[in-house]
Amino acid sequence: MNRYEGRRVLITGAGSGIGRATVHRILAEGGRVVAADVSAEGLKATAERAAADGVADRLTTAVLDISDEAAVIAGVASAVGTLGGLDVLVNAAGILRSEHTHKTTLDFWNTLLATNLTGTFLMIREALPALLEGEKPVIVNFSSTSASFAHPYMAAYAASKGGIQSMTHAIAGEYGKQGLRAVCVAPGSIASGMTTGRGPGLPEDADMSLFTKLMPAIGEGFAGPETVAGVIAMLASDDGAFVTGTELRIDGGTHM
Ligand SMILES: NC(=O)c1ccc[n+]([C@@H]2O[C@H](COP(=O)([O-])OP(=O)(O)OC[C@H]3O[C@@H](n4cnc5c(N)ncnc54)[C@H](O)[C@@H]3O)[C@@H](O)[C@H]2O)c1
């Protein structure tokens, strides 16, 4: 499939997990990609894989902290310049931290919201003018199963993801007549840096019996990030042409 030939794509969180898998999927389908992440080390590994696949000529990497307004303004402008416009924005960058809600400091709360919710907003605000001039423009945002189902110790994370979901609906309504689609993926039970590497960092005294829905109904446990990347590639292509203002849960049926 070459659904992305001629398509210009900016992906955040591209130095690990689902963001990185999406970079490789879009490159494999012929797209040109700017891969952004706060981790230079992560981006190096993403670029090495693209080189091994023989598609590095269509990839540019950029170190970018999505919670830093000035950096986002400069980073998006630079990405649009590199690509000569923009057709797709994939906002995969995010952090997961856990804490008892009654012990959650304002700093902890603000850090989660500043990265996940405000960072996603800043990327969208800066990318919108170029997207509205682009070809069949699409924004793919990252919600989470925690936005709709109870995930203990994750009030701040869940709030950030619920906010992203609501924001996506508003944007889909606001710009739909101009040809822009905005959708959310809501992953769950996906093996990535967040879930298996650094992990969610649950409180030491976490009551694990509260996690009643942990494992997928299908397969052999957590799935790889490429399972989400394939859905994103569908949603942001013509195959997803009638999908907007909604979210798609991708969790192997963990939450049914
Ligand atoms: N893995 C899951 O089961 C799951 C479930 C629900 C939602 N998600 C969402 O999927 C998205 C991708 O996460 P993942 O699972 O691949 O985890 P991951 O930790 O492997 O990847 C997240 C990436 O975001 C980057 N990042 C963090 N803060 C950043 C910042 N300020 N600026 C730029 N980049 C930043 C990290 O460096 C990392 O490369 C996240 O938004 C996450 O919340 C994942």
Image (cartoon, rainbow, N blue to C red):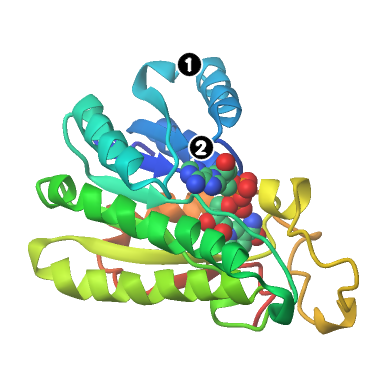
Q: Quadrant of residue 102?
A: bottom right
Q: Tag 2: Cα neighbours inside 10 Å, few (<14), some, or many (≥20)?
A: some
Measured along the vertical axis of the image, is residue 70 above or below residue 128? above
Q: Eyeballing the image, is 207 above or below 97?
A: below
Between the C-alphas of marks 1 and 2, the distance is 25 Å
N-term-proximal mark, 1 vs 2: 2
Under circle 1, the secondary element is loop
Q: Amino acid at mark 1?
A: Gly
Question: Where is residue 180 drawn, in percent x and y?
Answer: 18, 60
Q: Is residue 160 left or right of residue 106?
A: left
Mark 2 lies within 8 Å of ligand 1 (Cβ measured) = yes
Query: Mark on residue 84?
Result: none
**Of circles 1 and 2, which is in front?**
2
Instruction: Please tell me the numbered disc located at residue 38.
Output: 2
From this viewpoint, is residue 96 visible? Answer: yes
Location of mark 1 (residue): 54
Residue sitting nearer the eye, 135 or 76:
76
Q: Nearer the viewer, residue 208 or 189?
A: 208
Q: Quadrant of the C terminus?
A: bottom right
Count how many numbered circles sit on residues in the image.
2
Q: Nearer the viewer, residue 19 or 52?
A: 19
Q: Is residue 120 left or right of residue 51?
A: left
Query: Residue 247, located in which quarter of the rendered image?
Result: bottom left
- Secondary structure at badge 2 equals loop
At a point 81% along the width and 59% down the height, the residue shown is 220
